[in-house]
Image (tube, rainbow, N blue to C red):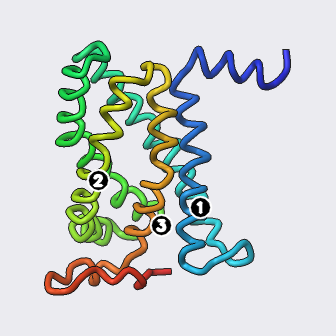
Amino acid sequence: MNVFSKLRVVFKKYPLLRGMASYGVIWPISSLIQQSFEGRNFDNYDWWRTARYGLYGSCYVAPTLYTWLTVANIIWPGSTIRAGLIKTFVETITYTPFAMCSFYFGMSLLELKPVHEAVAEVQAKFWPTYKVGASVWPAVAMVNFCLIPPRNRVPFISVCSLMWTCFLAYMKHLDKEAIKSKNKAVPFLKINT
């Protein structure tokens, strides 16, 4: 039995590991894409930032998402449109805000920022991020809940999250003061490095 066959057996038996592996690859790739938009290249990428995205994606996002999807499937079983609408609605008002707050807070802590700075970042960036997420993720969630088998839901979401995570990485490295400005549009080039 070769390595790929063994991995396939393990991933089939333990779907959480499949999600962790996919997030451990996709989140760092998203960080590199976002850094490329900053004007960085292979010679000056922030590899520690990329590693933080991989650690956070694989060890936090994948398990919490797997847990949410498992609980949602138990409470509202099935792949009907009705079940999908209920899961999507509940996800949009519960898991999504939790995930966004966790992202800004957790990534700030991984950057070794003090707790008060992590809280300030959540306060400054949560609503702008949530507004964009609430306009994108319900459609993705409906497809996930209605068309994708439960064992493939975490990997499906991880693939869909590639561009979303690029957006999160972009928002993460925007200057908090630029976002707080209520009278001005968010400047799309003011990036913290």
Q: Which of the pair 118/11 is nearer the observer? A: 11
| Labels 2 & 1 near each other (Cβ < 8 A) | no
Left or right of 38? Residue 120 is left
> For mark 3, what is the residue?
111
What amino acid is at disc 2? Answer: Gly
How far is the residue under mark 1 from the one under mark 3?
Answer: 11 Å
Left or right of 70? Residue 20 is right
Give the structural element (helix, strand or loop) at label 2. helix
Query: Residue 151, how many percent across, how many down?
Result: 48, 20
What amino acid is at disc 1? Answer: Thr
> For mark 2, what is the residue?
133
Where is residue 130, by image quadrant?
A: bottom left
> For mark 1, what is the residue?
50
Left or right of 19? Residue 71 is left
Q: Residue at x 42, y 54 (%)?
A: 164
Mark with earlier residue (2, 3): 3
Q: Residue extending furthest left?
A: 183
